[in-house]
Image: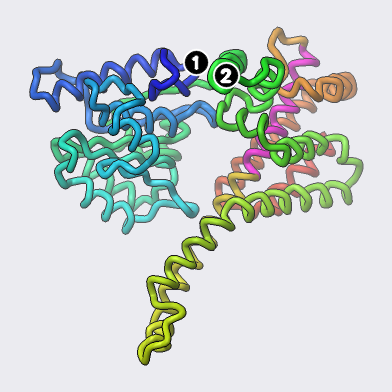
Amino acid sequence: MSSGDVFSDLVGQDEPVETLRRAAGAAARVVAGEPVASGAMTHAWIFTGPPGAGRSLAARAFAAALQCERGGSGCGECHGCHTVLGKTHADVRFVVPEGLSIGVGEMRALVLRAASAPSGGRWQVVVIEDADRLTEAAGNALLKAIEEPPPRTVFLLCTPSTHPDDISVTIRSRCRLVALRQPPADAVAAALVARDAMPSDTAAWAAAAAQGDITRARLLAADSEARSRREAVLAVPKRLTGVGACFDVAATLVAAAKAEAAASVAEPDAAERSALEQALGAGGTGRGAAGAMRGAAGQIKDLEKRQKSRATRAQRDALDRALVDLAGFYRDVLITALRAPVAVVHGDVAAQSQAAAGKWTPESTLRRLEAVLACRESINQNVKPEIAVEAMMLSLWRG
């Protein structure tokens, strides 16, 4: 596999990649007007898999292969591949929920645009990166489009699973499924060494710590702040010395997630606000300028509402990354206690997980792990993060 291939970042996903390659080849033959076998290419796909499996990466790579000008090979070098991977292709739309859900208005507008003929003559592609966040009404609007698809439109949906809580049964029944797995850490480490020229010891540590998520592994290897945040999370178990400490640690964890989220959205927020104010005539001195800015207050308020929703989403995502790291620690304690023949996730704190394995029973460790997973689920169900994290900390302390 060449380093420029659009599928090259999908580590340890040989079977799904083979499926997508075959479909992209069939799609290219459809464009060329050649006969293809029934079912070789379909108009609606669902990409599932755990965090870090690369659902969005797979959908984007497949979208690039569909627009590839070299027989749908996904060469990674032609204009079609480049513009899709850079998210600038005119016929490929990426739907990334800025807030907690994708609304019906946005979905209807998208379906309408997707019904037009592709300007480049190949395919109109709609990539919905978090299809599990579709509201019921948005899901219904999408379902109508999937039931009666325009001839050259392809829908690519990314969702953690095909459980009815994540995607409606009727949408699932009309899509072809691509199930991705969590790639093994050694495969991710090998990819980081080969493609990023990362030292092998750094790559091995980052791949294990990121639990097979190649994007996060790169971040941990390159960003000292990301490493510090992870270290703070892994120090949580030994800081839980009493009820008061539980509330303090919970407050610290939530505050850290808020700070991380605020830093990640500050730049796009400022750029959006500046662009909107300029479009509305900010700084103008003519007779109508003051009146125009007064009339623009509603648009600025709408932007602030969207940005607040995006900040909430970013905070939830940052907190979820911390909880995944914490769950990894309790999993390490459990496998150490049971002498399971698998590698620990957090090798750099193996002494800490080993000490805990000597102190806790496997049953109490399992209860702690379940408390972390329950906290993730609660936050997913819109329980206030502070409340969910405080309840989790108390459970972790009690065991």
Farthest residue, direction bottom:
287
Q: What type is the residue that disc 2 sits on?
A: Val
Residue marked by disc 2: 188
Is residue 75 shown to the viewer in this render? yes
Residue marked by disc 1: 12
**246 to 42, vertically: above or below:** below
2 vs 1, front mark: 2
Q: What type is the residue that disc 1 sits on?
A: Gly
Image x and y of residue 126, in percent: 30, 41
Q: Which mark is residue 111?
A: none
Secondary structure mostly seen in the magenta stretch: helix
Image x and y of residue 311, in percent: 57, 56
Q: Does residue 271 appear left or right of residue 62 in this picture?
A: right
* Number of residues whose C-alpha sits closer than 10 Å to that of mark 2, classed few (under 14), some (14–19) or many (20 or more): many
Is residue 148 shown to the viewer in this render? no
For the point 39% across and 39% down, the residue is: 86
Q: Which residues are magenta?
A: 319-338
Locate the C terminus by quadrant. top right
Q: Secondary structure at mark 1?
A: loop
For the point 56% across and 45% down, the residue is: 380
Are dots 2 and 1 in contact, CB under 8 Å? Answer: yes
